[in-house]
Image (cartoon, rainbow, N blue to C red):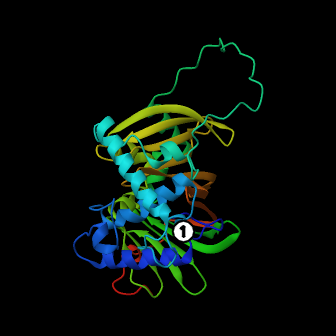
Amino acid sequence: MRLLANGRLSSAIFMFFLVAMNRAGAAEEPKTAEQVFKNIVELKGTPADQLIPAMQFIASSLGVECNFCHVQGKMDSDDKPEKKTAREMMAMMFAINKSHFGGHREITCYSCHHGAAHPAGTPPVLESDLAEHKEAATAPAAQSPSADEILNKYITALGGAEAIQKITSREGKGLIVFGENQTPIEVFTKAPNKRISVTHMGKGESYTAFDGTAGWLGNTGRPARQMSPAESEAAGLDAEFYLALRIKEIFPELRRGRPETIRGFECSQLIGLKPGHPPVRFYFDNQTGLLMRLVRYGETPLGRSATQIDYADYRPVNGVRVPWRWTLSRSNGRFTIQLSEVKANVAIADEKFAKPEGEVK
């Protein structure tokens, strides 16, 4: 599934998957895709909560919407030949990885499609003259800072470890922006790792939360849904209140990545690694030391999907600089949260982050 231009999923398709996943989430034991959805062929044995991310990966890799393969309203139907082709392509991809890469996932849908429904088989012609060869710069490259130096500069830029540890909670108010749509939002965070955002939709509220152990999602008038393990891990990272002080604890291995230019600013990159998990990339402004971008990856049965968070508009609140604006981008959509008010060390009960029993009120 892809997000439409205004940031919303195709409603009929979204509701189909939402109903199915609510049934899966209500069960005590995790279920496979074929136990929750109808007519599963190539992805049998896949956890049910991984089917939607897999479909999103296909849609993003081909640059299409769900109805490219599926009959709207009859998602289990095989009436469209594109669905049969998609299954054949998945089988081919699995076979290539098994026979040529020892079962490791090296080839994905995106390897050939690159956002096009039909892969190009012919290299494109040049559309401009080649630039003249330029001699490599002879100036010696400056010595790259170590991971510890980058993190220490980040902590100092925020206000220092002592000031950071004096803050135990924050409450922010502002707007969440999807394309041309703007909706009021509140974001509550509490040390060490609790977070909940409340989007005020007019007829009710939408909740995204991490209670310190697991994540959940909810909408007014409906039962809250527990996040999948992958979703919960991502939400837990977002909820890290003292992230700057805990990066080395969260990631047993930190590697230097290639420097990047982000929005015109030269940045140093650190790659956080821990066994059995995809890497997380952190980009720090070389001049200010502040975190400008975080990129994390979610595993799907067909490949990794990236989530990019860009941080901006850092302002001091009670002696600690915090971003008042962040933009979350995925291959199928993006949104921006712009805060207009932030308060620190406010009293927030732990119950505020807890997943409600029954319908969300």
Q: Name the residue under label 1.
A: 67
Q: Which residue, as the protein is rendered here, is positioned at the far right? A: 129
In the rendered view, tell whether residue 3 sits above or below residue 299: below
Q: In which quarter of the image is the C terminus?
A: bottom left
163 or 207, nearer to the observer: 207
Answer yes or no: is residue 320 visible: no
133 or 360, nearer to the observer: 133
In the rendered image, residue 146, in percent from the top left (x then y), is placed at 46, 28
| Count of residue discs | 1
Q: How crowded is mark 1: few (under 14 residues within 10 Å), some or many (20 or more)?
A: some
Q: In this view, does 211 lie to the left or right of 114?
A: left
In the rendered view, tell whether residue 44 sits above or below residue 183: above
In the rendered image, residue 149, in percent from the top left (x then y), is placed at 47, 32
In the rendered image, residue 210, in percent from the top left (x then y), is placed at 39, 67
Residue at the spot 54% in from the left edge and 53% down from the top edge: 62
Residue at the spot 65% in from the left edge and 65% down from the top edge: 5
Residue at the spot 36% in from the left edge and 51% down from the top edge: 91
334 or 21, nearer to the observer: 21
Q: Is residue 354 left or right of residue 139?
A: left
What is the secondary structure assignment of the residue under circle 1? Answer: helix
Q: Is residue 50 left or right of residue 131?
A: left
Answer yes or no: is residue 333 visible: yes
In the rendered image, residue 60, in percent from the top left (x then y), is placed at 53, 55
Of the residues shown, which amino acid type is indicated by label 1?
Asn
